[in-house]
Image: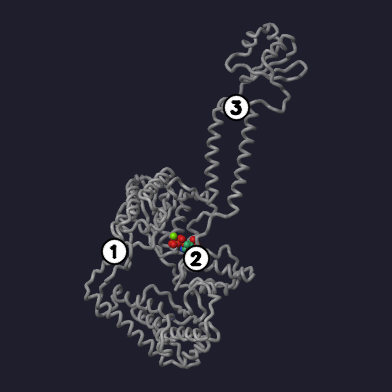
Amino acid sequence: MKAPHNPKTGKQKPGGVKEAIYKNVVGLLAFFLIIILINNIFNGDPTTDSKIVPLNQIVQDIQSDKVSKITTSGSVIEVTYVDGIKKESKKEDQSSLTETLANLGVDKAKLTAIPFEVKNESGFAYWLGTLFPFLLPILFFLFIVWFLTRQMRSQNGAMAFGNSRARMMHPEGQKQKITFADVAGAKEAKHELEEVVDFLKNPKKFSDIGARIPKGILLMGAPGTGKTLLARAVAGEANVSFFSISGSEFVELFVGVGASRVRDMFKVARMSAPAIIFIDEIDAVGRVRGVGMGGGNDEREQTLNQILVEMDGFEPAEAVIVMAATNRPDVLDPALLRPGRFDRRVTVELPDRKDRLEILKVHARNKPLEENTRLETVAERTSGFSGADLHNLMNEAAILAAREGNKKISQHDLIRSIEKVMLGPIRQTFVLTAEEKKLTAYHEAGHAIVSTMLKHSDPVHKVSIISRGRALGYMLKLPTVERKTQSKHEFLDDIAVTLGGYAVEKSIFGDISTGPSNDLQVASALARDMVTKYGMSDAIGPIALLPAGGKTMFGNGVDDKNFSEKTAQLIDSEVEKIMKTAYDRALEIINKHRSALDAIVKELVEKETLEQAEYEEIIKREGISLEK
Ligand code: ADP
Ligand code: MG
Ligand code: ZN
């Protein structure tokens, strides 16, 4: 029923590139200006009105007594004339000035009469002066490299790296560095990862004492629980380079390309150690090898092999850590999970109520909330939401507020967003005919009344016949306490509630629409799980007949049933029994409380949505106790 959203924020702003080019042009101009300035410092002061004259001119001037003083500094000769004019000339570097002048035929007597000063060039200036012509091309080259990398980085906040296609990010280069403070909840996962941060910050401390550092860390958890976020936070905390690539990017059509990309990426990462290589959604490449439909995928296998080879090739002291994330750890190749590879596994759980509140607070940081909003209520009503869902919720609330021209987000906006995230947006253009409306109302009221009457079912929170997403209407239950596990009784009641809609349609209309088909699927899957996974059937007993991950199409073969045909028949009959019993219970409740059902439908058709209080009022009016 829930539509998981995964908001991928686009990094590239349309204005960003233009701005970057502009900045670069300014940088370029500044650079050339500096070069020109430096050049001027070493090649004489342009502010004095001295002119460069040939050496024999000076010889003549000395002969005709026009010169009052000569100063040399390196190869530069500064001549001061009697009338105060200064002129400059040059001589060969190594030869002495007196010798040069004598060679050019100046009278010794005239020469001795002129005050003669040899200025030592200061050491630094001298060296710079001589080295500068050589340094210039090198500086220029370095500048070009810097210029190009900067341009690349500013294009999408990341550096496209060689052939590996991995995005390289240095935390410093990121506009918004992500740290553990941005990851709410997930305490255990953060605790585990702190050790990794410690190692990346100070690898020597660990290697000195002979500790073997984990090479690979596998983050496992449902989609949207913050695995990618955690990996980035580790890089941010440790302040190291972060190479990120997603598993599906590895998978290319041409054999061998994937493997060479892996090689590339590991090479670059080693050069910039300490570093983190992050392979997101590794199940795309890391599935069990050698099986799968239509023969193995050669390319994928080679890529996977290359990852394994590279990980084996790490030196123990190399501060490169490979992190990977997956929501399907069950389909991963066992070779990936061997010691020395992804032997450290961190599970990221769906947030509980307290964590949900924390996550909401994180995402409310830069959003103006009205004073009377209570995020606690939102956290309470979003059981089963992932971090990504909560992020999405806050965003939807902000959009709602903005669309209605409000400056702040209200509690009402938040509550409306819960349903939007859970069920998809309201289908505005979707109009039910009067007949459909009535049928839908009976269907949803059926779910509701069964839920109210059964002991182990949660209180009804909302009933609605406003269509959202794919559903024509919906009924929401709300657990009074957070549940980590579910008992057999709860399962049985859940199935009965799910079949409530079907039972109503059949008993009241004597006809079945396509509406409840999803209900049937959900109920059957639940019943089957009870029998095959949780050992909740007496006839079969305490055996798990299917692996926890269930069937997979492309990974671990489809036909790995580890039970006989006879057991298969038994499973079918047990599932059937559960479904039949549940259906009968639902039917019984509906027949017994027909007048209450009609009352709910009447109001529902009129108001389209009944909140908990309105619903409970009708129930009470009908003389039904809500005590369980
Ligand atoms: P995953 O990789 O597990 O599918 P992501 O790390 O991509 O999930 O999470 C998606 C978004 O959900 C994040 O960008 C973040 O905004 C939000 N989010 C998820 N978990 C948390 C959390 N624990 N704290 C804060 N935000 C979270
Ligand atoms: Mg992810
Ligand atoms: Zn239904």
User: Which percent across, then down, holds residue 591?
Assistant: 41, 92
Looking at marks 1 and 2 on the same chain, the residue that comes earlier in the sequence is marked by: 2
The residue to which callout 3 is attached is: 125
Residue tagged 1: 557
Is the CB of mark 2 within 8 Å of ligand 1? Answer: yes
Q: Earlier in the sequence, mark 3 or mark 2?
A: 3
- Residue closer to the observer: 329 or 467: 467
Label 1 Cα neighbours within 10 Å, binned few <14 / some 14-19 / many ≥20? some
Give me the residue at 66% from left, 7% from top.
105
Badge 2 marks a residue whose secondary structure is: helix
The N terminus sits in image quarter: bottom left
Q: Earlier in the sequence, mark 3 or mark 1?
A: 3
Asked if residue 38 can be seen in this view, the reply is yes
**The quadrant where residue 564 appears:** bottom left
Depth order, front residue of 27/261: 261
Is residue 329 placed above or below 538 in the rendered structure? above
Res 359 label: 2
Left or right of 523: which side holds 59?
Answer: right
